[in-house]
Image: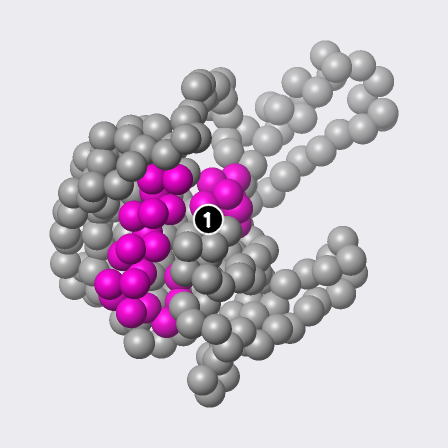
Amino acid sequence: MTTLAVLEQRDGVLRKISHEVVTAAQRLGGGVEAVVCAAGVVQGADQAAKFGADKIVTLTNPAFATYAPEACAQALAERAKQGGHRSIVFAASATGKDLAPRVAAKLGVSVAGDLTDLATDGAGLVVTRPVYAGKALLKVKVMAQPAVLSLRPNVFTPVERPKAGAAETVAVNVPAGRVSVREIKAAPAGTLDVAEAQVIISGGRGLKEPANFKVLEELAR
């Protein structure tokens, strides 16, 4: 059975975290269908094939020009039902943490979230997530299908496994929903998304005053 890997895009450009999602989906065996909600063509979406996507589907709707949680959740749930996927994999990003539960609710299942490992085990999946502020690891066997999973960023290192990656664009007719994004404040140019950072540098009282944090900013770059 196949896995639906949900990609993320921002301003029409595929986010790097999507490569991790496709790589993790490969662990579950079977085929991988990568899907993304967008208003049009997503730059870099074809790169999902490099990491193992057998098929790349862009679900288009004018509402997807910005993040439209209800519309995207409806479109993804319908796609999951049509494809009969065994599992649906999200990134546990700000978007994924909001979207995964919405999709799960529409499918009548729960979410196994913030995962650091996953594997197949007979008819089910065994997933691992940290608990007690990372002091312990909890292993859970997920029997429900489709299994809705979200992955902790920067844990699943992208691995190239080139596939054909047949591309398909599907216009979806779904209501925009009651939730709308009023404004998105972009980070200053040159600022790296924390969710995609390989190393995080932090400072405390030893820096004495806010102006001294510039030293850390320069080091981080």
Residue 193, magenta (yes or no): no
Q: Residue at x 76, y 53 (%)?
A: 133
Quick check: 126 left or right of 13?
right
Locate residue 141, reporting x and y percent: 57, 77
Residue 145 to residue 17: above or below: below
| Residue 172 quadrant | top left
Q: Secondary structure at mark 1?
A: helix
Task: Using the image, determine if residue 112 lies above or below residue 18.
Answer: below
Can the viewer see residue 26? Answer: no
- In which quadrant is the C terminus drawn? top right
Left or right: 205, with 115 as reference point: right
Q: Amino acid at mark 1?
A: Arg
Residue under numbered circle 1 = 102
**Which residues make up the magenta segment?**
70-99
Mark count: 1
* In magenta segment, residue 89: yes
